[in-house]
Amino acid sequence: MLSVTQRVLAVTAMAAMILVLAASLPAQGQQGPQPLPGGGTYQWTKAAPIPIKMEELYGLALDGKMYVVGGLGPAGVPPGFMYVYDPATDTWTKKKDMPRPVHHQAQAIYKGKIYTFGGCTQQLVGDAAVDNSWVYDPAADTWTALKPMPGRRCSAKGAEVNGKIYVIGGFGPMENGKPGTRVNGVNQAYDPETNTWEERSPMPTARNHAFSGVVNGKIYIIGGRLGSGSAGSASPTDVVEEYDPAKDLWSDVKAPMPTLRSGGGDATYNGRIYVAGGEYGGRQFSAAYRALEVYDPASNMWTILPPMPVAKHGQGTVFLGGRLHLAGGVLTPGNGFGPDSNSGTAQHDVLEYPFP
């Protein structure tokens, strides 16, 4: 675990990096390649907008294409959309909707198919969480029901490691039928070959709306919300925890995420985990972020990257061909009761950057 002194030094160093980078960045909307402080250039470009203006369209990269699944409609009602983006033609195609529409589902890819788990059918409360599990076959454009999770959960994280899919954290109903929401660190492994579930070591920091990634067979859970599923009544966290499925063990906490937030997008590329956008909710103020940061598990260090063109959360986030794609999302922080219809965006931004 990092000492207080180490954390202070890390935060001080990160603040210095932010100041240096911010001084070199162009104003929002400026076009063309831009210089980086250490040499080289980066450029944000625009791709075909997603056909709908909506948040919580979670992204997955499969066979060189971007799939976005889910969606959060007005009053928390989910449309259960499935769209696929092809960078070769810069086009979006509508696919079959989820059989039981939900938002804030966990998801992962295994052997060319998309698996989804849980989610919410209405607002971000425990009583709206479900236990449904599904697999989507892109080749056939079909959904098939799987064995349900051992408990109802919403806003968990899904990650595939060595043939098993781990569904970690989130929130669900209170015990014994009591009304309310229980944020949890539940960790359950699904085996696609046997269609079975098993309990695993729970995550030390119970949370939801987190970021995540898999590097070298280990799962990293980053940031998220404590205490509630709704941004307005939750406490955001910067905690980073590492889980080793082979040993069923959680490590001490890692270097904290520079920007305290939840509810953004994440993607893993070349052994690093990229965290994009997100939101902060608190008693005094709320905000959406342009922050784009990358975590390197090998060095246990964070790096600040050029910020997103606009501040938003709930966008699809994937790497395609060495470029980072951000599609959809909403421009204002949420309150757990569905998106602001005036701030949902179809914007599809692509970062061309010398990714290591």
Image (cartoon, rainbow, N blue to C red):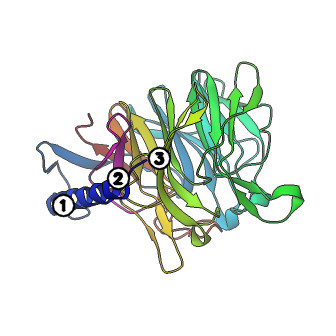
The quarter of the picture where the C terminus appears is top left
Residue 114's x, y, as percent? 62, 31
Q: Quadrant of residue 23?
A: bottom left
Q: Which amino acid does label 3 sit on?
A: Val
Looking at the rendered image, the disc whose residue lies closer to the viewer, 2 or 3, is 3
Q: What residue is shown with label 3?
A: 253
SS label for mark 1: loop
Residue 296's x, y, as percent? 35, 39
Q: What residue type is labelled 1?
A: Pro
Mark 1: few, some, or many residues within 10 Å (few <14, many ≥20)? some
Verify whether residue 55 appears in magenta: no
What span is colored magenta in the figure?
291-311
In space, the residues marked 2 and 3 are separated at their CA atoms by: 21 Å
The answer to whether the residues at label 2 and label 1 have Cβ atoms under 8 Å apart is no
In space, the residues marked 2 and 1 are separated at their CA atoms by: 15 Å
Q: What residue is shown with label 2?
A: 292
Mark 3: few, some, or many residues within 10 Å (few <14, many ≥20)? some
Q: Which residue is drawn at 88% across and 57% down?
A: 176
User: Is tag 2's residue or tag 3's residue first in the polypeptide sequence?
Assistant: 3
